[in-house]
Image: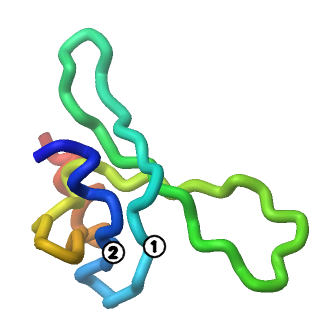
Amino acid sequence: MRISEMTGKEVINLGDGARLGIIGECELVFDSKTGVINGLILPKRRMIFNFWGDNQISTIPWQAIRRIGDEIVIIDLNNAYERMYSR
């Protein structure tokens, strides 16, 4: 799958059902020495009354991604950190 194919997919956390945003202009975080993908950076939703909107971002660990479907990306943030540090 190409990163461009992820555009427009909604990101939902499996643990609490929270909608984290829609992948638009996302970026990948990877280890430059090994080429391993470490995470996905996606812009946070802007609030309606956020006039001083900083460019806020969310970093989703690659290990948190459970499924990539036609319209949504399901992530599990609750267990991602346990999997990352239990190795």
Foreground: 13 or 24?
Answer: 24
Please, is residue 49 above or below residue 53 in the view? below
| Residue 9 pos. (x, y %) | 29, 70
Say which amino acid is labelled 1: Gly
First in sequence, mark 2 or 1: give its number. 2
At 11% from the left and 67% from the top, the residue drawn is 67
Report the side of 66 relative to 46 (left or right).
Answer: left
Q: Which mark is residue 42?
A: none
Residue ranking furthest to the right = 52
At 40% from the left and 86% from the top, the residue drawn is 18
Please, is residue 61 above or below residue 34 in the view? below
| Residue 60 pos. (x, y %) | 37, 55
Q: Which mark is residue 10?
A: 2
| Residue 5 pos. (x, y %) | 21, 54
- 2 and 1 marks in contact (CB < 8 Å): yes
Q: Residues within 10 Å of mark 2 (few under 14, many from 20)?
A: some
Q: Quadrant of the C terminus?
A: top left
CA distance separating discs 2 and 1: 6 Å
Foreground: 71 or 80?
Answer: 71
The colour scheme used to paint the residues is rainbow
Report the side of 53 relative to 18 (left or right).
Answer: right
Please, is residue 24 above or below residue 46 in the view? above
Say which amino acid is labelled 2: Glu
Mark 2 secondary-structure assignment: strand
| Residue 26 pos. (x, y %) | 42, 49
Residue position for label 1: 21
